[in-house]
Structure formats: C-alpha cells, structure tokens
Image (tube, rainbow, N blue to C red):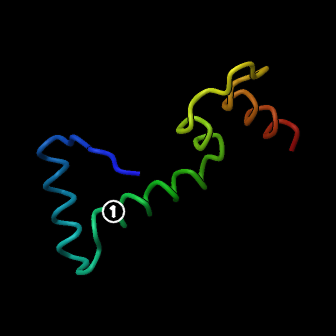
Amino acid sequence: MRVTLYLPDHLAQEIEAYRKARPGLSLSALVRELLERELLKRPEALLEVAGLVEGAERSAREHDALIRKER
C-alpha cells in the first residue's frame, strides 16, 4: 500500500535526525516498525486502523476492555 504522510516541519526534522543516526534505516522501515510495535502493544488498534466492522455488537475498544476485565 502506498500512502502520503504530511508531517509538521519539526517532526520531519526529528525523523531525519533519527534516520541519519541509523544508516540504512528507510522511512518505510521506520514507519512499519513503529506501527507494528503500537499494534502489538494495543491489539484493538489493529481494528481501529482497519475501520469499523458493520453490525458489530461492540467496538474494538469495548471488546478489548471486556477481555482485559475477564483476565
């Protein structure tokens, strides 16, 4: 998938400084790594990124809260 990101100048500068300190790290690899880390940390985030499921009885956040409560 191809997407276009618009970043504020200060964030773009931070990203470039981060990448310069890590030769060989592409912007695509950085974004993938950060998204995967975030999605693993919050399983419901994957459903949020994918969008709402039509006809679902509860939202991904409500479902996640229910599962965490049962543990």
Percent across and percent down for residue 27 are 28, 63
Determine the residue positioned at 43% across, 58% down. Answer: 34
Percent across and percent down for residue 23 are 23, 81
Q: Quadrant of residue 48?
A: top right
Near mark 1 (Cα within 10 A), the count class, few <14, some 14-19 or many ≥20, is: few
Q: Secondary structure at mark 1?
A: helix
Whether 10 is drawn above or below 23: the answer is: above
- Tell me if 26 is positioned left or right of 69 in this view: left
Residue tagged 1:
28
Q: Quadrant of residue 63?
A: top right
Q: Pick whichever, 23 or 51, lies toward us.
A: 51
Determine the residue positioned at 51% across, 52% down. Answer: 38
Q: Pick whichever, 46 or 22, lies toward us.
A: 46
Whether 69 is drawn above or below 54: the answer is: below
Q: Quadrant of the C terminus?
A: top right
Q: Quadrant of residue 70?
A: top right
Q: Amino acid at mark 1?
A: Ser
Percent across and percent down for residue 19 are 22, 69
- Given the current orientation, which residue lies at the most extreme front position? 1
- Tell me if 50 is positioned left or right of 71 in this view: left
- Tell me if 47 is positioned left or right of 28 in this view: right
Count of numbered tags: 1
- Given the current orientation, which residue lies at the most extreme right position? 70
- Tell me if 44 is positioned left or right of 23 in this view: right
Q: Pick whichever, 28 or 68, lies toward us.
A: 28
Determine the residue positioned at 72% across, 27% down. Answer: 62
Percent across and percent down for residue 56 are 75, 22
Whether 65 is drawn above or below 55: the answer is: below
Determine the residue positioned at 16% across, 40% down. Answer: 8
